Amino acid sequence: MFSPTCVILLAGGLYLFYRRIARNVNLPPGPRADPVIKHLRIFPVKDHAEVFHEWATVYGERIIFYRFILIEPYVDGRAGDVMHFSALGRSFVVLGSKQAAVDLLERRSPNYSDRPSSPMNDLFATAVIVEIAYGHRIASSDDPYFRLMEEGTKIVSGVGTAGTSVVDVFPFLKNLPPWFPGAWFIRFGIESKKVLQKLRDYPFQDVQEQMTAGRAKPSFMSLHLEEFTRAGVQDPKEFHDLKVAALLLYQGNGLSICILVSTDHLSLVSAGADTTYSSIMLFIFAMLFHRDSQKRVQEEIDRVVGRNRLPDFSDRESLPLLECLIQETFRLYHPIPIGIPHRSRNDDVYRGMFIPKESIVIQNLVSMALDENIYSNPTEFLPERYLPQPRGSGEPYPGNMFGFGRRICPGRHLADASLWIVISNLLAAFDISFARNGYGDEIVPHGSLLQEQPGTL
């Protein structure tokens, strides 16, 4: 016979177990998870938006939910635009359609307006992310990992908003020597570089040492290093990508740092970084490969504005094809393809899918751009698609460049105006084409869209 205490404990345990199972089976779809570490082993090292889009495509076509334990499954084909994965207790929800982003981030904005909390204000959150990334458990604010994160955040605060620092206003000052009176910003940059290099390299080296000693705990870094060892990976660039990917986990926890590292150079971009510059460079890149579209817009500018002056804002409504060109460029060449992360304040249910409290909610703008329910031939560059019939098909503008809900970019109107005036003047004054070699042949760039590419204005 069981004692009353054992019966109560057993009943309570079964209740909690079934409650947990019932909650988990209604999570949004996603890849099959490993025990304990969940999706940590397969979390993408790079090209996050593209990998998330591929996952949504695969799992969106054969999504099966269970209404309850041991009940027959049913298929919901819409659910591919909401995907879930987790790592060591941290939930991530990826939104792959504009409809899902609007439904959650705008219509339910009170629940999704939080950003992932700052690690400097939340020791627990920092500990969670550090454990996921490196298998290191933070016990106090004196921990070297925590101090390193704190130094990184101070650098971000010191950098300020892009475009407002003294070097942004007077670029020639960046050439001053560190000892020059008043050149505090040069000395700040030198010291910042040291901190950022340590932020990148120290955790990586620590995990390597733990693995050598046989004491490493399962983590994002250790699992990928084990795979590198099995595959015989020696390329320094692969290790660099792994370091940066681990740092991106901190970004989801509120440390607004993006580390851009090559083998011989490192730079810092703070939150609110100058995406206007990146967007302009992406536009130039796109025009290299879509010169027919470029030519048609230039003809529109010549016809409406003439050749005796440059376009100004009063011309904007009279240049619809230019507007379509800009919209199509940033549909397919978005400077921030996974958007700015949000965080859910409370548990929520969306279309029968459970979204846990404190989930990191990511907008996958690549999936939104390739949504066949909205765009015909979505992989093709077709600016005219936005024009009303009969010239176009009347498809809607993407409308997601500056984010969603209460966390939408507060400087979006200025950024939009800046992009339009720069792009319109570029096309009015220049032909954008490839550089040519000594034989007159075009030099066609290869590689990632995010890398600088040779081109000529």
Image (spheres, rainbow, N blue to C red):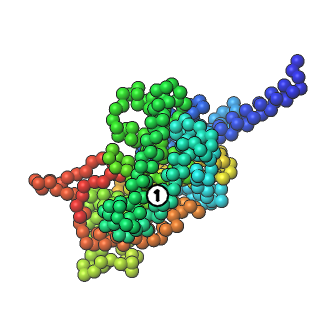
Split into 4 quadrants, where in the image is the C terminus? bottom left
Query: Residue 43's x, y, as percent?
Result: 49, 39
Residue toward you, 57 or 155: 155
Q: Is residue 105 left or right of residue 280?
A: right
Query: Residue 454's x, y, as percent?
Result: 24, 55
Q: Is residue 316 above or below residue 338?
A: below
Q: Residue at x 47, y 63 (%)?
A: 160
Is residue 242 at all visible to an observer of this figure?
yes
Query: Residue 215's x, y, as percent?
Result: 53, 27
Residue toward you, 240 or 142: 142
Is residue 80 at all visible to an observer of this figure?
no
Corner quadrant of residue 292: bottom left
Q: Residue at x 53, y 34 (%)?
A: 219
Residue toward you, 382 or 390: 382
Split into 4 quadrants, where in the image is the N terminus? top right
Label 1 crowd bin: few (<14), some (14–19), many (20+), radius 10 Å: many
Corner quadrant of residue 208: top left
Q: Is residue 355 left or right of residue 391?
A: right
Q: Residue at x 52, y 54 (%)?
A: 153
Mark 1 lies on a secondary structure that is: strand
Q: Is residue 272 above or below residue 92?
A: below
Q: Residue at x 48, y 39 (%)?
A: 203
Query: Residue 229's x, y, as percent?
Result: 40, 28
Q: Residue furthest top?
A: 1
| Residue designated by label 1 | 270
